[in-house]
Image (cartoon, rainbow, N blue to C red):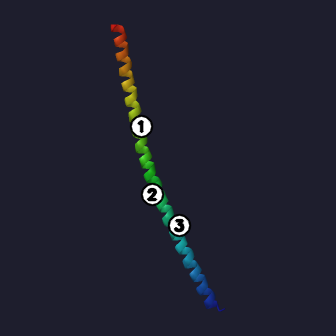
Amino acid sequence: MTSEDDTAIIARQLADLTRHVEEMANQLKAMRERADSQQERADTQQERIDLAARELVEVSARLQAAASALRESV
């Protein structure tokens, strides 16, 4: 095998390695974007849960006040 053959083999291996690294980088980028999107959805869902919890506390307080008023009137 000549040095030119060795150089060609190494060049092909380097090109393959570069292609694989680029594919892995693209996969990582896609995973990161999906994770960001999922985190945004989770944050939105948490905000809705928090709002619903506050509303439940308010409704509960009004129901307790109504029950107390009803007991006092009886």
Q: CA distance from mark 2 to mark 1?
A: 24 Å
At 38% from the left edge and 35% from the top edge, which residue is drawn?
A: 51
Give how far across and how far down residue 21 sits, in percent: 54, 70
Report the residue that reaches farthest toward the front.
74
What kind of residue is marked 1? Ile
Classify mark 2: residues with Cα within 10 Å, few (<14), some (14-19) or many (20+). Answer: few
Say which element carries label 2: helix
Q: Position of residue 52 (x, y in %)?
A: 39, 34
SS for callout 3: helix
Relative to 36, is 13 on the left or the right?
A: right
Residue 48, image x, y percentages: 39, 39
**Dot 2 corresponds to which residue?**
33
Crowd tier of the residue under label 1, counting other residues whose Cα lies within 10 Å: few below 14, some 14–19, many 20 or above = few
Tell me how far mark 1 sits from mark 3, CA to CA. Answer: 37 Å
Q: Earlier in the sequence, mark 2 or mark 3?
A: 3
Dot placed on the residue nearer the N-terminal end, 2 or 1: 2
Q: Disc number at residue 49?
A: 1
Which numbered mark, 2 or 1, is in the foreground of this view?
1
Residue located at (43% from left, 53% from top): 37
Amino acid type at circle 3 is: Met
Q: Is residue 33 above or below residue 11?
A: above
Amino acid found under the numbered disc labelled 2? Glu
**Residue at the image point whose x is 51% and y is 69% from the top:** 23
- Taking the image as shown, residue 37 lies to the left or right of residue 66, namely right
In the visual, does 38 lie left or right of 74? right
Q: Quadrant of residue 61?
A: top left
| Residue ID for mark 3 | 24
Which of these two is toward me, 16 or 3?
16
Residue found farthest to the bottom:
2
Write down the quadrant of residue 5 in the picture.
Answer: bottom right
